[in-house]
């Protein structure tokens, strides 16, 4: 028996630092994903071409949304991966319980969301630089091609919230699948069924539009943070059913 019982905060800190080191490989995947997204964004979208007797005009639209989308998907997948039995076994090295493990995972997901959002915004700027110098004879139109520091900070903050929200949902999905394996098929099927009932595609589901259509930054932040807290609270409540085997 230890003379001094370690506090919950110390255990969470130890687990969190351990996860930062052991999950470094995930960030290599992030680099690959965002590199592919940059290459994809360079192709442009909504291309249009017209010509006359005197000149030809070719128009292409460019956006860093594909970089952000790839980053969000990466966060979702990584959050599922840290719920696997292999990842849970690593926590056996610590004097821990389901509360400390989930709190450490939540801290890692938050860190992952911040880092990946920062690199996503920087990747978007990198793609603009590449476009600018590889198309010197082109004319770039659009008020957002050159972003101000305020716009960059706002984009960074909003991207963090989106990555965090989707990552926590991925974490919930992974935990549910660990409890009941068939859910890996049932949950996606249920989402597709709801989309069919609403006669729309998955991205236009009312539950998604609840966040996407919010124009107020304050209310959007509250929606995301409250949802994240509710999901994490639910995970902590039912995760005691998962056994960690050494």
Image (cartoon, rainbow, N blue to C red):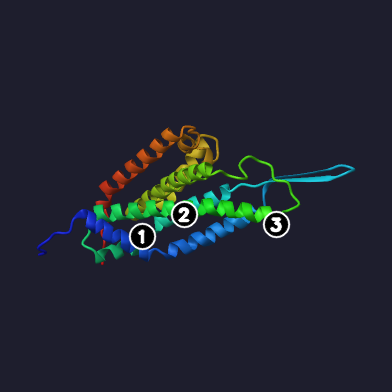
- Residue at the location (53% across, 58% down)? 33
Task: Give percent across and percent down for residue 234.
Answer: 30, 44
Question: Label 1 belongs to which residue?
Answer: 84
Q: Residue furthest right?
A: 53
- Earlier sequence position, callout 1 versus callout 3: 1
Question: Label 2 belongs to which residue?
Answer: 116
- Residue at the location (35% across, 38% down)? 226
Mark 2: give few (<14), some (14-19) or many (20+) Cα within 10 Å.
many
Q: Nearer the viewer, mark 3 or mark 2?
A: 3
Mark 1: give few (<14), some (14-19) or many (20+) Cα within 10 Å.
some
Provide the secondary structure element on which disc 1 rests. Answer: loop
Q: Are marks 3 and 2 in contact (CB under 8 Å)?
A: no
Mark 2–mark 1 distance (CA, rounded to whole Å):
21 Å
Task: Give percent across and percent down for residue 106.
Answer: 34, 51
Provide the secondary structure element on which disc 3 rests. Answer: helix
| Quadrant that contains the N terminus | bottom left
Mark 1–mark 3 distance (CA, rounded to whole Å):
44 Å
Q: Nearer the viewer, mark 2 or mark 1?
A: 2
| Quadrant that contains the C terminus | bottom left
Residue nearer the viewer, 140 or 158: 140
């Amino acid at each position: 028996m230890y003379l001094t019982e370690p506090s919950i905060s110390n255990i969470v800190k130890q687990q969190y630092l351990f996860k930062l080191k052991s999950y470094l490989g995930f960030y290599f995947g992030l680099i690959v994903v965002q590199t592919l997204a940059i290459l994809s964004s360079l192709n442009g979208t909504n291309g249009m071409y017209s010509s006359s007797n005197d000149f030809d005009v070719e128009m292409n639209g460019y956006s860093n949304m594909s970089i952000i989308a790839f980053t969000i998907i990466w966060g979702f997948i990584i959050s599922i991966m840290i719920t696997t039995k292999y990842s849970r076994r690593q926590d056996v090295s610590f004097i821990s319980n389901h509360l400390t493990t989930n709190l450490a995972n939540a801290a890692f997901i938050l860190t992952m969301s911040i880092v990946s959002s920062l690199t996503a915004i920087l990747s978007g700027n990198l793609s603009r630089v590449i476009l600018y110098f590889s198309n010197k004879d082109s004319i770039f139109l659009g008020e957002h091609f050159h972003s101000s520091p305020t716009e960059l900070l706002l984009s960074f903050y909003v991207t963090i919230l989106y990555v965090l929200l989707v990552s926590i949902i991925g974490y919930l999905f992974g935990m549910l699948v660990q409890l009941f394996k068939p859910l890996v098929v049932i949950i996606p099927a249920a989402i597709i069924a709801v989309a069919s009932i609403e006669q729309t595609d998955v991205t236009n589901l009312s539950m998604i539009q609840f966040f996407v259509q919010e124009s107020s930054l304050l209310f959007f932040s509250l929606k995301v943070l409250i949802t994240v807290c509710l999901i994490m609270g639910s995970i902590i409540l039912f995760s005691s059913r998962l056994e960690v085997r050494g």
